[in-house]
Image: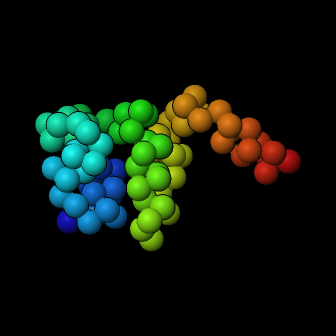
Amino acid sequence: MNHDHMVDRVAAALDVPLAGLARKLNVTRSAVGDWKARNANIPSEHCKAIVIMLEETSDPLTCMDLRPDDWQKWWPELAQQDKEHAA
């Protein structure tokens, strides 16, 4: 499977096709396809569920990986931990 987009990596880690990922996220297959086609980030409201699902796999994806440009906005508690760890 080609992992050019994060949805491909998530689907591969969960060992499901994109339609299976859509079912797990309770969205349509076309929604997942749209994220990929637009080269968009996975919407933030799905990221925590994805990270929880991935905890049962060997893939170390984090919220920061899923939303690299704005993860601090959605998970300020992680941003604070990151600052404390850096200090």
Residue 78, x across and y down, in percent: 66, 42
Residue 21 or residue 60, whichever sits in front? 21
Give the colouring mode of the picture.
Answer: rainbow
Q: Which quarter of the figure has residue 81?
A: top right
Q: Can the viewer see residue 16 in this picture?
A: yes
**26 up-or-down from 52: above or below:** above
Identify which residue is drawn at 20% across, 65% down. 1
Residue 44 or residue 53, whichever sits in front? 53
Q: Is residue 29 left or right of residue 12?
A: left
Identify which residue is drawn at 23% across, 36% down. 27
Residue 68, x across and y down, in percent: 50, 42
Residue 87 or residue 43, whichever sits in front? 43
Q: Which quarter of the figure has residue 38?
A: top left
**86 up-or-down from 16: above or below:** above
Identify which residue is drawn at 37% across, 33% down. 43
Q: Is residue 27 left or right of residue 76?
A: left
Q: Can the viewer see residue 37 in this picture?
A: no
Q: Is residue 15 left or right of residue 41?
A: left
Identify which residue is drawn at 47% across, 57% down. 61
Residue 54, x across and y down, in percent: 43, 59
Q: Which quarter of the figure has residue 10?
A: bottom left
